Image: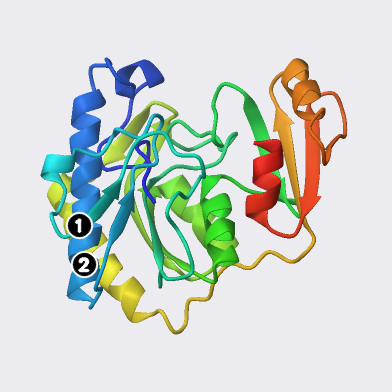
Amino acid sequence: MTDLEGATGVCGTWQDINPGGREHERARRFLTRDVNAAIEGAYEAGAKEVVVLDGHGAAFSIIPEELDERAKLIRGRRILEMEGLDSSFDAVFAIGAHAMAGTPDAILPHTLSSATIMNVWINGIKVGEIGLWAAIAGTYDVPLVLVTGDEAAVREAKKLLGDIECVAVKKATSPYAAICLHPNVTYRMIKEAAIRALRRLDEIKPFKVKKPVELKVEFKYVDIARRVAKRPGVELIDGRTVRAIGDNIIEVMSLVL
């Protein structure tokens, strides 16, 4: 799984890193390089197949011709948050991850949508995209074993998932600026962490959410919450918050998000 905001060297406003922004193409190269480091480490640790999901925005962030040719790439607007994942996989890496909405010391913190979503909870635990990815992977009994991103994203991952492998590629000084490590340094760090992560597969367990699974979402605007609450199986809790209960996270996400 990949995202853009947590990649090496990526910082600035949304206007800077979104398509057409002055940093967009550079950000794509940074992300692709981080992903290549993880791929290289995975193969060195014995992986037989690596599938990369382009997970940012419209999902055209990774540069295919610069991607390690041993990997397969899923790109384009996806239907499911972790398109292509199933129980045949042994592990998930999250490369370029960012912290959840409201995190004070993080680069561009948000959860799924900076424009419409305020907070998300799984069974009463506030989570960001890292937590959602881990829960989806856990549905297939697949562990999330490596997270790379800024220091806030790493802290969030370790608080929720425990002693998994993590790489902090930068430290935010504001939502739009960061102290960044050199790309050559982070490449080595990510590669080494990927090797360690796969060698620790026996000790890193999948993140399993207890049933029934409750997903609660606080939207930014009342009208969005009321519209979502009209779907079967969705309940309006207050003016901006809805919830759904089901057997797994994939089911309830399809109802609410």
Q: Is mark 1 on a helix, strand or loop?
A: helix
Image point 25% across, 42% down: which residue? Answer: 31
Tell me: residue 58, above or below residue 243.
above
Image point 44% across, 84% down: which residue? Answer: 202
Query: Of 59 and 240, which appears nearest the observer?
Result: 59
Tell me: residue 180, above or below residue 174.
below
Q: Residue 199 carries which label?
A: none
* Residue at numbered disc 1: 37
Amino acid type of the residue tagged 1 in the rendering: Ala
Amino acid type of the residue tagged 2 in the rendering: Gly
Answer with the quarter of the image where residue 89 lies.
bottom left
Query: Of 33 and 245, which appears nearest the observer?
Result: 245
The x and y percentages for residue 190 are 25, 59
Horizontal relation, residue 30 to residue 87: left or right: left
Answer with the quarter of the image where residue 98 lies.
top left
Tell me how the rendering is colored: rainbow
Horizontal relation, residue 244 to residue 81: left or right: right
Quadrant occupied by the C terminus: top right
- Cα separation between marks 2 and 1: 6 Å
Q: Is mark 2 on a helix, strand or loop?
A: helix
The answer to whether residue 50 shows anywhere in this view is yes
Mark 2 and 1 residues: CB-CB less than 8 Å, in contact?
A: yes
Image point 44% across, 39% down: which residue? Answer: 78
The answer to whether residue 189 shows anywhere in this view is no
* Residue at numbered disc 2: 41
